[in-house]
Amino acid sequence: MIVTIDRIESKFAVCEMEDGSFENLPKAFLPPKAKEGSKLKIELDLKSEAEDRKRIKGKMDGLFKG
């Protein structure tokens, strides 16, 4: 999904979504150089998610082994 920063207000960036609607994103979510007119790509990182799940499962298995 690609969103466009329409404007920045206080602690939020008002972003235009692909469907033309507008949503507020906290400025803390923005890359440091983001500004009005910047395009943001929002996507799931399924590979990292799977790696995290595997790592956490390994820790949980280690904690609960008899």
Image (cartoon, rainbow, N blue to C red):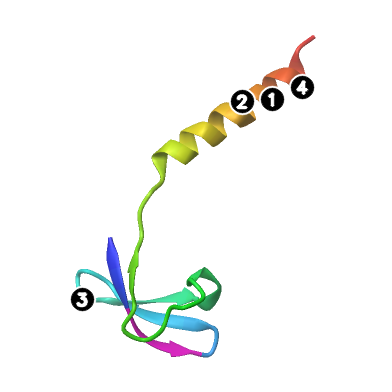
Q: Do the residues labelled 1 and 4 touch (CB within 8 Å)?
A: yes
Quadrant in the picture for residue 17 = bottom left
CA separation in Å, label 3 and label 2: 40 Å
> Which residue is pictured at 19% across the width and 70% down the height?
19
Q: Mark 1 points at which residue?
A: 60
Tell how many labels. 4
Residue sitting nearer the eye, 7 or 34? 34
Residue range corresponding to the magenta coloring: 5-9
Q: Which type of secondary structure does the marked residue at label 3 adopt?
A: loop
Q: Residue flagged by tag 1: what amino acid is it?
A: Met
Residue extending furthest toward the left = 19
- Could you say which disc has been placed on residue 20 in the image? 3
Could you tell me which quadrant the C terminus lies in? top right
Residue extending furthest toward the right = 66
- Classed neighbour count for the residue bearing mark 2: other residues with Cα under 10 Å, few (<14), some (14–19), many (≥20): few
Q: Mark 4 points at which residue?
A: 63
Estimate the x, y position of residue 12 in percent, counting from the top left.
Answer: 49, 82
Label 3 or label 2, whichever comes before in sequence order: 3
Q: Residue flagged by tag 3: what amino acid is it?
A: Gly
Chief SS of the magenta region: strand
- Could you say which disc has been placed on residue 57 in the image? 2
